């Protein structure tokens, strides 16, 4: 049924796969194409609607605008896909390791520098802290899983 997102079952998996596909097929990248990127975006949008409806149906009171988060997520990835830094998706957050030379771009699209984690981070909406202690990136990866894609990439091992 899906050419690019076969086997994807969650919004998190969809986002990780989208990031991989953008890195490979975005028109700004060597070998990329506008047509393929449009196909990927159309397929992503279609599957996102299905997955977000399933997620909302499983919640007693839907109170979150998944479509707005999705639109923002895609927009941010498209704006930073070309930078030469490691980009990692952990849950609904985007983390950029290194990339200090892109400081102005990252700030302009809403990234904040997390000095204790020594990387840039972005998430949709206002951040609400639900814990008292500082949580490490490894603890966050452990809880939500992570995907790191790009020329310098490697997937973090999740125990």
Image (cartoon, rainbow, N blue to C red):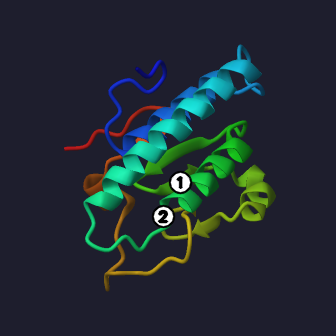
Quadrant into which the C terminus falls: top left
Q: Which of 60 and 39 lies nearest the eye of the viewer?
A: 60
Residue 31 drawn above or below residue 138: above
Residue at 38% in and 23% down:
6
Residue 152 in view here: no
Which residue extends farthest left?
Answer: 159
Q: Residue 76 has which mark?
A: none
**Disc 1 packing (10 Å; few <14; some 14–19; many ≥20):** many
Secondary structure under badge 2?
loop
Verify CB contact (< 8 Å) between mark 1 and mark 2: yes
x then y, percent, for residue 82: 72, 36
Q: Residue 95 has which mark?
A: 1
**Disc 2 packing (10 Å; few <14; some 14–19; many ≥20):** few
x then y, percent, for residue 24: 61, 22
Residue 143 in view here: yes
Secondary structure under badge 1?
strand
Q: Earlier in the sequence, mark 1 or mark 2?
A: 1
Left-right relation of 135 to 65: left
Residue at 57% in and 41% down:
86
Left-right relation of 14 to 111: left
To which residue does mark 2 refer? 117
x then y, percent, for residue 2: 44, 22
x then y, percent, for residue 25: 65, 22
Quadrant into which the N terminus falls: top left
């Amino acid at each position: 049924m899906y050419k690019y997102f076969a086997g994807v079952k969650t919004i998190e998996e969809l986002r990780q796969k989208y990031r991989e596909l953008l890195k490979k097929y975005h028109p700004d990248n060597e070998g990329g194409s506008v047509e393929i990127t449009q196909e990927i975006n159309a397929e992503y949008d279609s599957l996102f609607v299905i997955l977000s409806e399933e997620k909302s149906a499983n919640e007693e009171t839907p109170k979150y605008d998944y479509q707005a988060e999705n639109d923002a997520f895609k927009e941010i990835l498209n704006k930073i896909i070309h930078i030469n830094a490691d980009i990692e998706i952990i849950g609904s957050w985007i983390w950029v390791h290194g990339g200090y030379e892109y400081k102005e771009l990252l700030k302009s699209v809403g990234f904040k520098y997390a000095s204790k984690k020594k990387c840039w981070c972005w998430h949709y909406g206002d951040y609400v802290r639900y814990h008292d202690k500082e949580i490490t990136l490894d603890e966050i990866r452990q809880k939500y899983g992570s995907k790191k894609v790009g020329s310098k990439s490697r997937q973090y091992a999740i125990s």
